[in-house]
Image (cartoon, helix red, strand yellow):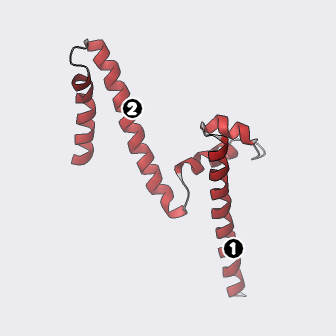
Amino acid sequence: MNSARGRLTRRGVDAPERARPGATCDELDDIAIYIQMQICHSLMNERLRRALGPHAISNRGYFVMVALRSRPDNLVDSSELCDATGESRGNMTRICDDLVEVTLQRLLSRFAEALAHN
């Protein structure tokens, strides 16, 4: 673990005591677990963002694709996607539009490469 992540984790461990100085040990443990989960979630999201960056796909777009691929026919109702990802209908529309745009750009790029080789 690098020193920046170590400091982040250490702050997460110390945060409950700073937030609730008179709390019992059990209360501090619950708060510490929650904070550690939040830190872990943040670090995982950042790592996923870096992995998906070269493909021009957002974290949310990735989770939508996972939800689609989990279906036998790769088809899903938009309300089911919203339920599966916790996104609003408006945001789901934006996410799907972004995915369609990325897909079209890739298809056009491949088509242009095929034409160039012929």
Residue 102: horizontal and vertical position, in percent?
A: 63, 63
* Other-residue count near label 1 (Cα within 10 Å), few / some / many at <14 / 14–19 / ≥20: few
Q: Position of residue 85 (x, y in %)?
A: 61, 38
In the shown orientation, is residue 89 left or right of residue 15?
right
Which mark, residue 44? none
Please report whichever mark, 2 or 1, sits nearer to the chain's N-terminal start. Answer: 2
Residue under the image location 54 percent in, 62 percent down: 55
Which amino acid, by three-letter code, is at mark 1? Answer: Leu
Which residue is depicted at the point 67% across and 49% down?
Answer: 93
User: In this orientation, does residue 1 appear?
Assistant: no
Badge 2 amino acid: Met
Q: Is residue 111 visible?
A: yes
Q: Is residue 53 left or right of residue 72?
A: left
Q: Which of the two residues, 115 or 85, is positioned nearer the viewer here? A: 85
Q: Circle 1 sits in a helix, a strand or a loop, which is it? A: helix
* Residue at the extreme front of the image, as rendered: 90
Residue situated in front as seen by the camera: 107 or 16 = 16
- Identify whether 9 is placed above or below 31: below
Instruction: Report x, y in % for residue 73.
Output: 78, 45
Q: Which residue is mark 2?
A: 37
Q: Residue, x 68% and y 86% (percent of image)? A: 116
Say which residue appears at 72% left-offset and 38% top-offset: 79
Q: For the residue labelled by badge 2, is the local secondary structure a helix, a strand or a loop?
A: helix
Q: Which residue is mark 1?
A: 108
Query: Quarter of the image containing the N terminus?
Result: top left
Q: Is residue 49 left or right of residue 100?
A: left
What is the tally of numbered marks visible in this picture? 2
Quarter placement of the C terminus: bottom right
